[in-house]
Image (tube, rainbow, N blue to C red):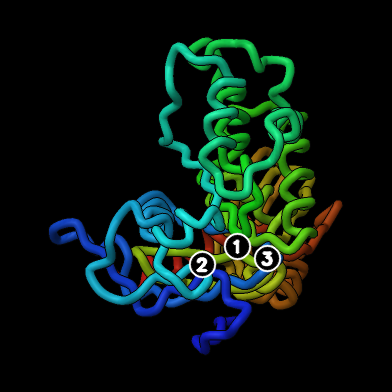
């Protein structure tokens, strides 16, 4: 599940033993990873995991204390000046007292390989608000304008930080449809998100950061398998004696709500066998793998437990 550290001609991004500290806090700790053309990669991690610092290092907004960051074999700033990188940052401010069209036109004028302004507006879904002042936009509209700025030209790498924050469901779906088109054309898309269902549905590859280190790297299915647990849910009729349920073997968590019991187990077969051994008769019994969100929580919780 780990990526190779061998540099290849097709490498888009290369981090080699990169570290960055703020005082006593190690935000990025010996990070090594590779991204390749056409990948859609989700960057996940709890708050403080180092996601934003990683993106800042990638975009040349911060300098690493040690290690190297390369984009298309050059430094981040060289790649950005060449127009090979488009970025949409959650914290990126937008100019006030200009219209959306004026701002997008400026971005196109500055890009070495710019697209026509009308195409950029349409792709981002902001044509209808093109003549509106930027400071009069809603949060979701502002996000779409940031997306327009990130895709103002023919960039080979698109970096997105929490891109769909503030967007409604239809806008999010349209956004990701556009991102799929970008990846299908050979571009690499790297996005940090708290919407784990987006990572599950969109990403070819998932990177999980924890305390600045790469904790897991693989497809969403591989990340789920890494968690090692499965979900067991069932209903019980009549009065519930919770103590025997809470003492079932291999439980990692249990939630009892009314007559519905939801369990996470590291050995679902043994847990279910023991359940029937209690002499109860579960109804609507379901056993399934963890979703990406539950797997993410399980993996990071296990790592936290190691540090205690």
User: From the viewer's perspective, is 263 left or right of 160?
Assistant: right
Q: Secondary structure at mark 2?
A: helix
**Marker disc for residue 39:** 3
**Marks 2 and 1, Cα distance to the nearest angstrom?**
6 Å
Q: Nearer the viewer, residue 248 or 145?
A: 145
Q: Secondary structure at mark 1?
A: helix
Residue 216 in the image: above or below residue 154: below
Q: Residues within 10 Å of mark 3 (few under 14, many from 20)?
A: many
User: From the viewer's perspective, is 259 left or right of 12?
Assistant: right
Q: Nearer the viewer, mark 3 or mark 2?
A: 3
User: From the viewer's perspective, is 228 left or right of 98?
Assistant: right
- Name the residue at 69% across, 50% down: 261
**Marks 3 and 1, Cα distance to the nearest angstrom?**
22 Å
Mark closer to the chain start, 3 or 1: 3
- Name the residue at 68% across, 48% down: 198
Give coordinates of residue 74: x percent, y percent. Answer: 44, 71
Q: Secondary structure at mark 3?
A: loop
Q: Residues within 10 Å of mark 1 (few under 14, many from 20)?
A: many
Residue 113 in the image: above or below residue 203: above
- Name the residue at 62% across, 49% down: 113
Query: In this orientation, does residue 231 appear?
Result: yes
**Marker disc for residue 295:** 1
**Marker disc for residue 299:** 2
Give coordinates of residue 116: x percent, y percent. Answer: 71, 35
- Name the residue at 77% across, 49% down: 236
Name the image quarter holding the C terminus. bottom left
Q: Nearer the viewer, residue 48 or 37?
A: 37
Mark closer to the chain start, 3 or 2: 3
Q: Please identify the quarter of the rendering in which residue 291 is found.
A: bottom right
Give coordinates of residue 213: x percent, y percent. Answer: 39, 70
């Amino acid at each position: 599940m780990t990526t190779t550290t061998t540099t290849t001609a097709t490498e888009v991004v290369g981090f080699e033993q990169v570290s960055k500290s703020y005082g006593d806090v190690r935000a990025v700790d010996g990070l090594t990873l590779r991204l390749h053309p056409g990948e859609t990669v989700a960057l996940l991690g709890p708050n403080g995991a180092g996601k934003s610092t990683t993106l800042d290092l990638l975009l040349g907004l911060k300098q690493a204390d040690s290690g190297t960051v390369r984009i298309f074999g050059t430094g981040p700033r060289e790649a950005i000046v060449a127009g090979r990188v488009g970025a949409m940052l959650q914290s990126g401010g937008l100019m006030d007292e200009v219209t959306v069209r004026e701002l997008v036109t400026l971005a196109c004028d500055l890009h070495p390989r710019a697209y026509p302004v009308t195409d950029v507006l349409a792709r981002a879904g902001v044509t209808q608000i093109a003549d509106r002042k930027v400071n009069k936009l809603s949060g979701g509209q502002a996000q779409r304008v940031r997306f327009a700025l990130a895709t103002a030209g023919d960039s080979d790498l698109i970096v997105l930080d929490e891109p769909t924050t503030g967007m409604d469901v239809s806008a999010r779906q349209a956004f990701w449809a556009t991102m799929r088109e970008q990846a299908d054309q050979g571009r690499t898309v790297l996005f940090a998100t708290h919407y784990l269902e987006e990572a599950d549905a969109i990403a070819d590859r998932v990177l999980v950061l924890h305390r600045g280190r790469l904790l897991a790297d693989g497809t969403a299915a591989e990340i789920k398998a890494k968690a090692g647990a499965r979900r067991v849910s069932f209903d019980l009729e009549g009065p519930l004696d919770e103590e025997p349920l809470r003492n079932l073997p291999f439980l990692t968590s249990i939630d009892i709500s009314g007559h519905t019991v939801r369990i996470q187990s590291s050995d679902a077969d043994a847990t279910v066998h023991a359940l029937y051994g209690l002499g109860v008769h579960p109804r609507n019994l379901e056993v399934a793998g963890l979703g990406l969100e539950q797997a993410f929580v399980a993996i990071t919780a296990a790592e936290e437990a190691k540090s205690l």
